[in-house]
Amino acid sequence: MDIESCRKIVELFEAIRARPAMYTGKSYDYARTIQLITGFRLAIAVTSQIDLGLDDVKTAYFRRGWNEVYFGAVEEMKAKGLEGDEITRELLSVEIDFWNSHCERLS
């Protein structure tokens, strides 16, 4: 993957974060958001033949203060008082951070 493609992925996730309901049907449905993220990652891994390893995903969550990933992190978010829309936006923010880090490695 080249840096230009990587930056476009960041832009895409920023657009999704701005209007999550347009992409998932419900802005508060974090399960659909996780499905969108994992489906997107799978498509990128297959078509680009790059390894988007779980270690990098964990690092992105940890940098934002979460000890778990995906649904585990959702439980942490709930425990800290975040609700539907906030959880969705945080999940997307983690994904944006992940891709920004990936882009940095490419440059």
Image: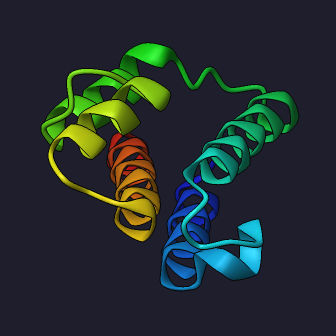
Q: Quadrant of residue 26?
A: bottom right
Task: Give the vertical position of 71 relative to 26 (above or below).
Answer: above
Q: Residue at x 77, y 40 (%)?
A: 39
Nearest the viewer among 13 and 75 is: 75
Q: Residue at x 31, y 21 (%)?
A: 68
Where residue 18 sits: x, y (%)? Answer: 49, 84
Task: Give the vertical position of 10 relative to 97 (above or below).
Answer: below
In the image, is 88 to the left or to the right of 58?
Answer: right
Where residue 3 sits: x, y (%)? Answer: 52, 57
Q: Residue at x 48, y 16 (%)?
A: 54
Nearest the viewer among 105 and 18 is: 18
Task: Give the vertical position of 15 relative to 36 (above or below).
Answer: below
Q: How is the image coloured?
A: rainbow
Where residue 72 sits: x, y (%)? Answer: 39, 24
In the image, is 80 to the left or to the right of 11?
Answer: left
In the image, is 52 to the left or to the right of 73?
Answer: right
- The quadrant the N terminus occupies is top right
Q: Residue at x 61, y 58 (%)?
A: 29
Q: Quadrant of residue 35?
A: top right
Where residue 66 sits: x, y (%)? Answer: 20, 32
Count of marks placed on residues:
0
